[in-house]
């Protein structure tokens, strides 16, 4: 059974930093492409970014709103995904989910399949 | 890309069927055969209910079905049950190396 468990959320002041973790089990993490998606009441579901598997280059891609401020990484030895968030803004307040991305016979599809339970990040002074 | 268009609300009585639409463009829903649907209860994470337009993951009741015609995908819930009351979101592939597109969500009420 695929399990994704996020941690690290909390209250942080504007301009501050936070690192989220996502512990995974139930699938071969080293072969997986992973993503972070956030959700706010007003804006619905919103991409944060993704990271490819090491065999596919291990590169990252980010949504425009977070590019240059957020960094996604993965530690295959610990089956854990990370999201380093710097220069946080009030508009980054959201529930952050880690997700797997499905692998099909045509390649990886960049929409989520399995989701973690989410962790709340509140950016406020 | 713009968000996929879903009705903000839908409703039905227990035992009835309800269909939720998800309208995109030829650059997403109409151009690719990968649309997913997620169910989200209050305070919970989204749960995958349908993938690849009409496939159900193991454990999802066969009361849930998906389809697509042109630029519009649909989720049908048959034999509505109280526990089906939730928010439902669609998402569509938008091509290789592009982030997929999400719908704005539909609140399903079981009357």
Image: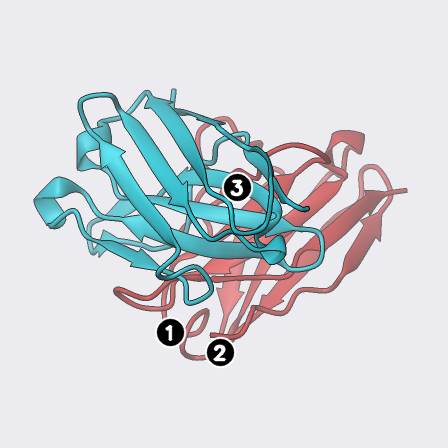
Chain colours: A cyan, B red
Q: Which of the numbered marks, if any, corresponds to residue B31?
A: 1
Image location (x, y in percent) of residue A55: 9, 43
Residue A93 versus residue A21 in the image, above or below: below
- Residue A122 at x, y = what percent? 63, 42
Instruction: Identify the subunit bearing mark 2.
Output: B
The outermost residue toward the bottom is: B26
Q: Secondary structure at mark 1?
A: loop
Q: Are marks 2 and 3 in contact (CB under 8 Å)?
A: no
- Of the pair A16 and B53, the residue shown nearer to us: A16
Classify 10 Å Cα crowding around label 3: few (below 14), some (14-19), many (20 and above): many
> Is A70 situated left or right of A105 in this image?
right
Q: Nearer the viewer, mark 2 or mark 3?
A: 3
Residue drawn at the location 48% of the way across and 48% of the way down: A37
Q: Name the one closer to the observer, B17 or B60.
A: B60
Residue A79 is left or right of residue A94, and the answer is left
Residue B18 rendering spot, x and y as whole percentages: 74, 52
Secondary structure under badge 2?
A: loop
Residue B60 in the image, given as x and y percentages of width and height:
54, 32
Q: Are marks 2 and 3 on the same chain?
A: no
Q: Which residue is mark 3?
A: A96
Residue B25, disc: 2
Q: Nearer the viewer, mark 3 or mark 1?
A: 3
Is A58 placed left or right of A64 in the picture? Answer: left
Q: Chain of mark 3?
A: A
At horizontal 58% and vertical 32% (from top left) the residue drawn is: B61
Q: CA distance from mark 1 to mark 2?
A: 8 Å
| Image marks 1 and 2: residues in contact by CB distance under 8 Å | yes
Which of pointers 1 and 2 lies earlier in the amino acid sequence? 2
Q: Nearer the viewer, residue A1 or A16?
A: A16
Furthest toward the right, the residue is B111
Gap between marks 3 and 1 measured at Cα: 29 Å
């Amino acid at each position: 059974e695929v399990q994704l468990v996020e941690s690290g959320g909390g209250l942080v002041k504007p301009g501050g930093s936070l690192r989220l973790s996502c512990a995974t089990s139930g699938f071969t993490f080293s072969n997986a492409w992973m993503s972070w998606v956030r959700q706010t009441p007003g804006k619905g579901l919103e991409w944060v970014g993704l990271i490819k598997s090491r065999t596919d280059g291990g590169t990252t891609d980010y949504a425009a709103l977070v590019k240059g401020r957020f960094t996604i990484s993965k530690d295959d030895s610990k089956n854990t995904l990370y999201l380093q968030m710097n220069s946080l803004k009030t508009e980054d307040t959201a529930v952050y989910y880690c997700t797997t991305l499905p692998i099909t016979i045509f390649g990886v599809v960049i929409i989520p399949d399995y989701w973690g339970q989410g962790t709340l990040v509140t950016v406020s002074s | 890309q713009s968000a996929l268009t879903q009705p903000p609300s839908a409703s039905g009585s227990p035992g009835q069927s309800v269909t939720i639409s998800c309208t995109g463009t030829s650059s997403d829903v109409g151009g690719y055969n990968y649309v997913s649907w997620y169910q989200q209860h209050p305070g919970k994470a989204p749960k995958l209910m349908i993938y690849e337009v009409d496939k159900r993951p193991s454990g999802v009741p066969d009361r849930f079905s998906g389809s697509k015609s042109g630029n519009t995908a649909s989720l049908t819930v048959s034999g509505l049950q109280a526990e089906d009351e939730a928010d439902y979101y669609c998402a569509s592939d938008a091509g290789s190396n592009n982030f997929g597109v999400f719908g704005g969500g539909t609140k399903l009420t079981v009357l």
